Amino acid sequence: EYKKSDRDYLIDEIQQIGFRLAKKLNHEKVYAVNWSGKITKEDMEELNASIQDSYSELLNKMKVISENAPVISINTPLVNSFRKLNDNEAIKELERIYLSFVTVTDSKEKMIGFDFLNKWLERELMIFKNIVETTKSNDRTLLIIGSDHLWMLRKLFEGNGWKVINPFESE
């Protein structure tokens, strides 16, 4: 189905990179492995509100990450943005931020952060499962996915005995 689309790509990494690369390499199929899971807009808003109300240190760390995120623009080579998004230190910082959500509660002591992380980890496990189910033992797989997923998926792949290569890592 991806072969039917010709230059009418959406502005996302799946179509802009994945479809173009698959066409260039004459792949018959592109596999959709993402799974949005049970995280709702309300979950995100509730977590954000709790952090803004009661977790100023965490909020400041999140702001720093956001301010340092690469800007994708016509004036910046795309590979530079991808290198910054895939930087090992940036990925470790995202992991620390996500794991710090575990202690976030609202004013009624509802475990907002724990509940969010539970849904997030379920999402990561489902993405991992989808990839495992679509690959054969000797396959090389290119996964194009948002940087928030990298820290956990890397651990899952390596725990499964796979060699994970970051194509944007500096030599």
Image (cartoon, rainbow, N blue to C red):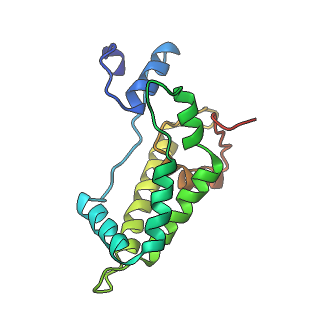
- Compared with 145, 29 (above or below) is above
Q: Nearer the viewer, residue 37 or 15?
A: 15
Residue for point 42% across, 75% down: 55
Residue in the foreground of this view, choosing between 118 and 162 = 118
In which quarter of the view is residue 117 placed?
A: bottom left
Q: Is residue 62 visible?
A: yes
Taking the spot 43% from the left edge, 67% from the top edge, the residue there is 59
Quadrant where the C terminus sits is: top right
Q: Residue furthest bottom?
A: 108
Q: Pick out the residue farthest to the left.
A: 42
Q: Is residue 89 left or right of residue 26?
A: right
Q: Residue 83, percent across and down?
A: 60, 37
Visible residue check, residue 160: no
What residue sits 64% from the left and 49% below the top? Answer: 88
State which quarter of the image contains the N terminus. Answer: top left
Q: How many marks?
A: 0
Q: Residue 167 or 157: which is nearer the viewer?
A: 167
Q: Is residue 8 above or below residue 133?
A: above
**Residue 82 location, x and y as percent?**
55, 35
Instruction: Tell me the residue at 46%/56% (across/down).
Output: 125
In this picture, residue 149 sits left or right of residue 9: right
Relative height, residue 117 to residue 90 (above, below): below
The x and y percentages for residue 107 are 29, 84
Q: Where's residue 62, x and y in %? A: 46, 61
- Up the image or down, 15 lies above or below 90; here it is above
